[in-house]
Amino acid sequence: MDDRNGADAPRGPRPLIVGAWVFGALAAAGALLGPVWWLLAPDRAEGTALGEGEVFTGTSEALFAGEGTFVLVTALAGLLSGYAVYMVQFPLARRRPRDLRLWCLLAGFLGSAAGTLLTWRIGMLLDTPLHTALARAQAGDEVTVGLHLDATAFLVAWPFVFVLQYALLDLISMVRRDLPGVPRRARAAAASPDTPWSGPSPVGEGPDPLAR
């Protein structure tokens, strides 16, 4: 890495461009994972319509399995995306040194949130016929329940795992002293805070009056 271009790298739109790419990539991944969730989810739960779009399913395993599949898919996406977003900064830093870690973290978090929302909505959209049939069913009719999430707290799985993976990789890089985009001199100074002062003496020239 060229130290000359590290801390003095030209300020410009590059962080915004990289952040936009990260956000767009994760959002697009979320759109692709919607059909994946729909395909991997087990057989749909059966229930009794209560009218006005409500349904009673009891403790159906199929219903919980669909939600569990969503959590597994999005958590795995968070693990992989956290790794990919952090590691892609190394080739970017070799081309033009610049510390993009905070920008990538923020863009990745927002992209993960957008991605998990798209996974949820697209997966439900693919079961639109089942949702429509439930909305039209009369009370007492037996219906098949389409994909949905009873607990929207499951939506935090992807952003949470993304941040956790990203922070873990950043900690490893700090220990190894190879932070992406951070100049070698800055890493050395941060790693050895006890380095003797090489500038002018604060007490001027001559013998140190405090020395014995």
Image (spheres, grey):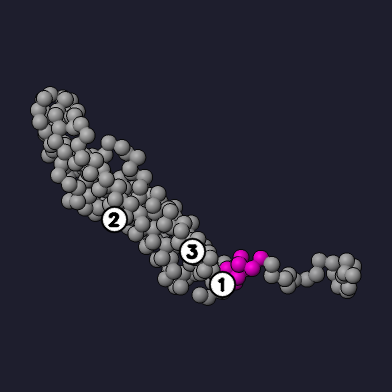
Residue on which the image places disc 3: 172
Asked whether, in this view, residue 88 is left or right of residue 27, the answer is: right
Q: Which residues are magenta?
A: 185-193
Q: Position of residue 133 (x, y in %)?
A: 11, 34
Task: Specify the label residue 30 is tagged with.
Answer: none
**Position of 144 relative to 12 (above/below):** above
**Position of 172 relative to 57 (above/below):** below
Instruction: Give the mark toward the camera: 3 or 1.
Output: 3
Instruction: Give the mark toward the camera: 2 or 3.
Output: 3
Residue on which the image places disc 1: 184
Crowding around mark 2 (Cα neighbors within 10 Å: few <14, some 14 to 19, many 20+) is many
Residue on which the image places disc 2: 29
Find residue 105 and report its image quarter. Answer: bottom left
* Residue furthest to the bottom: 2
Q: Position of residue 25 (x, y in %)?
A: 32, 57
First reached walking from the N terminus: tag 1 or tag 2:
2
Q: Residue at x 90, y 70 (%)?
A: 212
Name the amino acid type tagged 2.
Answer: Ala
SS for dot 3: helix
First reached walking from the N terminus: tag 2 or tag 3:
2
Find residue 126 and report its image quarter. Answer: top left
